[in-house]
Image (tube, rainbow, N blue to C red):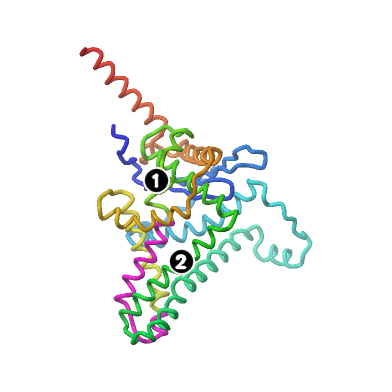
Amino acid sequence: MSDNKQCPVGGKGIGGQAVIEGVMMRGRELYAMAVRGPEGDIKLEKTFFTKKRPAWFRLPLVRGVVSFIDSLVLGMKIIGRSAEMAGMEDIEYDQDSKFEKWLEAKVGDKITDYVIGISVVISIVLSIGLFMVLPTFIGGWINGFLGDNARVRAVIEGFVRIGIFLGYIFLVSQMKDIKRVFMYHGAEHKTINCFESYEELTVENVRKHTRLHKRCGTSFLVLVMIVSMFVFFFVNTNTLWLRVLSRILLVPVIAGISYELIKWAGSHDNILVRLVSAPGLALQHITTKEPDDSMIECAIAALKGVLEEEPEEDGIYNAEKMAEEKSTETEEVQETADEDS
């Protein structure tokens, strides 16, 4: 069996995300989060998905939007939970505050769900404002000095959007706490790459793999920036308010197209795929860092937590079992060679 052969999952079964002092790995039926606790031990928590989605949620383009929103909601949820598991939630609040009593009386034990929902909405609004609406105004202003050409304006707007995005990523990457998250991000990628190479999940095996991955969320965001440039080049108008409205309304379409591209790139390997993946992989040199062994151990624990629960008939295989099969095949080949000699 070739070491370069793609995992049967094809990127559909295993995904992941770096969290505070740990890694979350996501399968089809559950996600497992492994976090390094304050005492240095690894805390593993598994959560099964309980909601079944309508079939039309899996349609091309639609599934990209659904996946994006799911990732935002789950991301908000697990970041807070990972902070608790890592022992970082030590702030005590006034239990007798009037606001808390009012909020609890209104929504009861669903406070967390409401907070997450509001946070996701705010995040989406701010993201659209920063990466879609603001470049529209800046691009139009710059284009005013160049003769007010609609096509030129669309290109300028696209480069302004990419510039804002890259500047945002660079500034965020300078934060001390984020640097550790980026190291766990690297551990997540290296572990999935080891898994998809049919190798046993050990620190030694994981360490030698690249920290870059074609299906990374960073690559998805880069594709959103690039796809938006092409879409807005053809969907253009000289009326400012219509131009702004089109940028907002076309966000789901752009997200859907970007998702399909990254899904396709994750299951193919050719020159075109490498060209599509190159910008995202390049940016991952910033959003991922080389992890230490303790971080790799967390990523392995999270992935094994998923593999222990996912049924093999759904296409998820056990990495250790595959490694044993490879070892057995090698031994059989050696025995045959000895017999022939």
Whether the magenta-drawn stretch holds residue 299 is answered as no
The mark nearer the N terminus, 1 or 2, is: 1
Quadrant of the rendering where the C terminus is positioned: top left
Residues packed near mark 1 inside 10 Å, few (<14), some (14 to 19) or many (20 plus): some
Query: Which of 24 and 292 lies nearest the eye of the viewer?
Result: 292
Tag 1 residue? 13
Whether the magenta-drawn stretch holds residue 236 is answered as yes
Q: Which residue is drawn at 43% across and 69% down?
A: 163
* Secondary element at image label 2: helix
Q: Which of marks 1 and 2 is in front?
A: 2
Residues packed near mark 2 inside 10 Å, few (<14), some (14 to 19) or many (20 plus): some
The single residue placed furthest to the right in the displayed view is 96
Q: Residue at x 38, y 86 (%)?
A: 145
The single residue placed furthest to the left in the displayed view is 340
Tag 2 residue? 165
Total numbered labels placed on residues in the image: 2
The reply to whether residue 30 is in sight is no
- Magenta stretch: give its range: 218-244
Q: Main secondary structure of the magenta part?
A: helix
Q: At which x and y percent is residue 143?
A: 38, 83
* Secondary element at image label 1: loop
Q: What is the three-letter code of the residue carrying label 2?
A: Phe
Q: Quadrant of residue 150?
A: bottom left
Q: Image check: 340 left or right of 298?
A: left
Is residue 154 placed above or below 279 in the rendered structure? below
Q: Which residue is drawn at 71% across and 52% down?
A: 90
Is residue 249 placed above or below 302 in the rendered structure? below
Q: What is the three-letter code of the residue carrying label 1?
A: Gly
Q: At which x and y percent is residue 35?
A: 58, 43
The reply to whether residue 164 is in sight is yes
